[in-house]
Image (tube, rainbow, N blue to C red):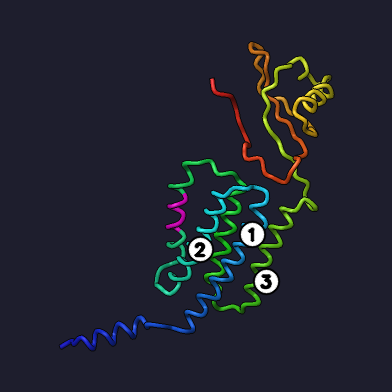
């Protein structure tokens, strides 16, 4: 006959009340992951984008992915299934809004970092720190204007279509500089509407600040 004492002993044997070694690993890896994700979001992503919504999203996803992968690592569930749950969530949620490619890249990087920090239990903390540092340095180099000069672009509905011909490109650029106040480097002519005497022009210019232009593409104005 199974007694209450037997059930209690079996439960405690399968799931200990407190595992000091496992808890210590959990806290250490969680702090490392939160620190790395925080540095990337606060000092590399946010200064240019100024998007608090993505700041919140990236931070919460980093924490959620870490907890999910770390805790499921001790359960007989394949990591592919765990990532599949997030993929389903991403498809359902992020398909409702056009997420810029820069934000999607940061999202993927944060997921990768969180997964690595959650699963890297068999390597030393020095190896884990070097791996995270590689992520930080790579993103810093790509975001730094010292290595890559950022050029912004925007679409303009232009009314002087007599200046869109190739022989008047210099006059067109000078007129756009005067009217927009931007240091325009080059232009591309898009759709031309001769009935309305207007044309879409894509202008490339040096940005006045390091902020990212979130309006990336507009094909037409509302009728």
N-term mark: 1 or 2: 1
Looking at the image, is 20 positioned above or below residue 180? below
Q: Residues within 10 Å of mark 2 (few under 14, many from 20)?
A: some
Is label 3 in contact with label 1 (beta carbons under 8 Å)? no
Quote the CA–CA distance across marks 1 and 2. 14 Å
Name the residue carrying label 2.
63
| Relative side of 45 to 62, left or right | right
Report which quarter residue 164 is drawn in: top right
Quote the CA–CA distance across marks 2 and 3. 20 Å
Q: Main secondary structure of the magenta part?
A: helix
Q: Element type at marker 1?
A: helix
Q: Residue at x 78, y 46 (%)?
A: 149
Question: In this picture, which residue range is highlighted in magenta?
Answer: 84-90
Quote the CA–CA distance across marks 3 and 1. 15 Å
Q: Position of residue 187 (x, y in %)?
A: 76, 29
Q: Residues within 10 Å of mark 3 (few under 14, many from 20)?
A: few
Q: Residues within 10 Å of mark 1 (few under 14, many from 20)?
A: many
Q: Residue at x 61, y 79 (%)?
A: 124
Query: Does 89 lie within the magenta span?
Result: yes
N-term mark: 2 or 3: 2
Q: Position of residue 52 (x, y in %)?
A: 57, 50
| Relative side of 167 to 23, left or right | right
Name the residue carrying label 1.
40
N-term mark: 3 or 1: 1
Q: Residue furthest top?
A: 195
Q: Element type at marker 3?
A: helix
Name the residue carrying label 3.
130
Q: Position of residue 223 (x, y in %)?
A: 54, 19
| Relative side of 46 to 207, left or right | left
Report which quarter residue 180 is drawn in: top right
Q: Element type at marker 2?
A: helix
């Amino acid at each position: 006959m199974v007694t209450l004492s037997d059930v209690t002993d079996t439960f405690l044997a399968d799931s200990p009340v407190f595992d000091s070694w496992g808890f210590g690993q959990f806290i250490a890896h969680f702090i490392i992951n939160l620190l790395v994700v925080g540095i990337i979001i606060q000092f590399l992503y946010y200064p240019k984008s100024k998007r608090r919504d993505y700041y919140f999203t990236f931070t919460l996803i980093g924490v959620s992915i870490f907890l999910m992968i770390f805790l499921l690592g001790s359960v007989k569930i394949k990591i592919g299934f765990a990532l599949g749950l997030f993929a389903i969530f991403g498809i359902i949620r992020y398909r409702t809004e056009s997420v810029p490619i820069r934000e999607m890249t940061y999202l993927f990087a944060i997921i990768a970092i969180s997964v690595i920090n959650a699963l890297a239990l068999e390597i030393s903390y020095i190896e884990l720190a070097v791996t995270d540092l590689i992520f930080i340095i790579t993103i810093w180099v790509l975001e730094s204007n010292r290595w890559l000069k950022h050029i912004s672009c925007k679409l303009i509905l232009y009314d002087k279509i007599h200046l869109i011909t190739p022989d008047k490109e210099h006059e067109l650029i000078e007129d756009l500089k005067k009217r927009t106040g931007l240091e325009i480097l080059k232009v591309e002519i898009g759709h031309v509407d001769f009935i309305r005497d207007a044309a879409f022009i894509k202008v490339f210019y040096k940005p006045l600040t390091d902020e990212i232009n979130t309006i990336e593409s507009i094909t037409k104005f509302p009728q």
